[in-house]
Image: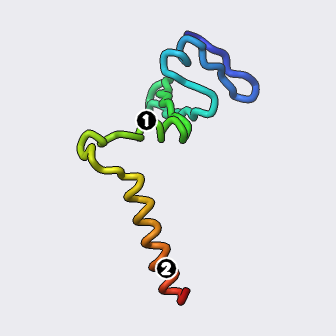
Amino acid sequence: MITTVTQKNMVTIPIDVARMLGIKPGYKLDWLPVEGKDEIIVRVIPDRAEMARRLMGMGAHLAPERDVITELDEEREREDIERMKALGG
């Protein structure tokens, strides 16, 4: 597919490519020039919300009985209490 670069160096992603790669508004594209060639590799970088969705639950099969979010909340609460004690509170 061929697209045209505008005066502001902008390019439109063809809809078929955007759909195939799941590119949505807010995603970033990482442009990597190929040394010695007139080629560019473009990596799709999802927005933070999508990355969090993809990461959420990864590894859950390793310890299904654990609630990691609750453990992190409890750890942060303990750290806050320790900080308050250290500050004399």
Q: Which of 20 and 50 is in front in this view?
A: 50
Amino acid on which disc 2 is placed = Arg
Q: Any mark on residue 31, and which?
A: none
Residue in the image at 47% along x and 76% along y: 81
- Label 2 belongs to which residue? 83
Image position of 71 (left or right of 43): left
Image position of 58 (left or right of 73): left
> Mark 1 and 2 residues: CB-CB less than 8 Å, in contact?
no
Amino acid on which disc 1 is placed = Arg
Query: In the rendered image of this protein, does residue 84 appear above or below residue 66?
Result: below
Q: Which of marks 1 and 2 is nearer the N terminus?
A: 1
- Label 1 belongs to which residue? 54
Residue in the image at 74% along x and 29% along y: 8
Q: Which of 81 and 23 is in front in this view?
A: 81
Colour style of the rendered protein structure:
rainbow
Query: In the rendered image of this protein, does residue 5 appear above or below residue 89?
Result: above
Gap in Å between the C-alphas at discs 1 and 2? 33 Å
